[in-house]
Image (cartoon, rainbow, N blue to C red):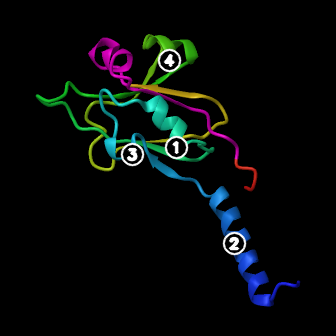
């Protein structure tokens, strides 16, 4: 049974759309509607929202310090051990406590390598006790 030209055109359109979706970078809010906050499990969130690809952007949205929270930040940790132990001694501050409001702080995943993020406030308590850490390993986009 041969496909009609309309059906063939529709299949071609679907194939082209799926290729386009693979090649376009995504902008993803870390934590979704929960944002970047104490007590949310970002490891589970990352597993549910992966894969990430090179040139995707992660957006960290969080409230500035207040009576209700001590403030959050975004650090990039240098390696897996620093991530596991919440060791900020060689970490790079990417976003201060005041940079997560509004549209949030954006980080573009530019390389095919692991990225380790954590909040370093309260001497690492946000990372250790509050689960405020996330890793992402962006995959290459093969259709670029």
* Inter-mark Cα distance, 2 to 4: 41 Å
Q: Quick one: SS at disc 2? A: helix
* Foreground residue among 54 and 1: 1
Query: Which residue corresponds to the image point at 50% horizontal and 17% vertical from the top-left?
Result: 83
User: Mark 2 vs mark 4: which is more N-terminal?
Assistant: 2
User: Is disc 1 in contact with disc 3, using a CB cutoff of under 8 Å?
Assistant: yes
Image-based side of 49 in relation to 5, left or right:
left
Q: Which residue does the numbered mark 1 point to in the structure image? A: 49
Viewer-nearest of labels 3 and 4?
3
What span is in magenta?
119-140
Q: Does 92 lie within the magenta span? A: no
User: Mark 2 vs mark 3: which is more N-terminal?
Assistant: 2
Q: Which residue does the numbered mark 3 point to in the structure image? A: 32
Q: Quick one: SS at disc 1? A: helix
* Inter-mark Cα distance, 2 to 3: 28 Å
Q: How crowded is mark 4: few (under 14 residues within 10 Å), some or many (20 or more)?
A: many
* Inter-mark Cα distance, 1 to 3: 9 Å
| Numbered label attached to residue 72 | none
User: Mark 1 vs mark 3: which is more N-terminal?
Assistant: 3
Residue 56: percent from the left, percent from the top? 55, 47
Residue 46: percent from the left, percent from the top? 50, 36
Q: Which residue does the numbered mark 4 point to in the structure image? A: 83
Residue most toward the bottom? 5
Q: Which residue does the numbered mark 2 point to in the structure image? A: 14
Q: Quick one: SS at disc 4? A: helix
């Amino acid at each position: 049974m041969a496909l009609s030209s309309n059906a063939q055109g529709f299949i071609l359109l679907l194939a082209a759309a799926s290729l386009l979706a693979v090649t376009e970078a995504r902008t993803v809010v870390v934590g979704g509607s929960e944002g970047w906050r104490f007590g949310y499990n970002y490891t589970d969130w990352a597993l549910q929202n992966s894969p990430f690809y090179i040139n995707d952007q992660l957006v960290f949205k969080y409230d500035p310090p207040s009576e209700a929270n001590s403030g959050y930040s975004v650090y990039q940790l240098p390696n897996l051990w620093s991530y596991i132990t919440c060791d900020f001694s060689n970490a790079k501050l990417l976003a201060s406590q005041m940079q997560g409001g509004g549209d949030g702080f954006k980080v573009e995943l530019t390389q095919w390598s692991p990225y380790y993020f954590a909040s370093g406030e309260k001497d690492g308590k946000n990372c250790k006790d509050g689960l405020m850490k996330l890793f992402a390993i962006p995959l290459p986009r093969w259709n670029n």
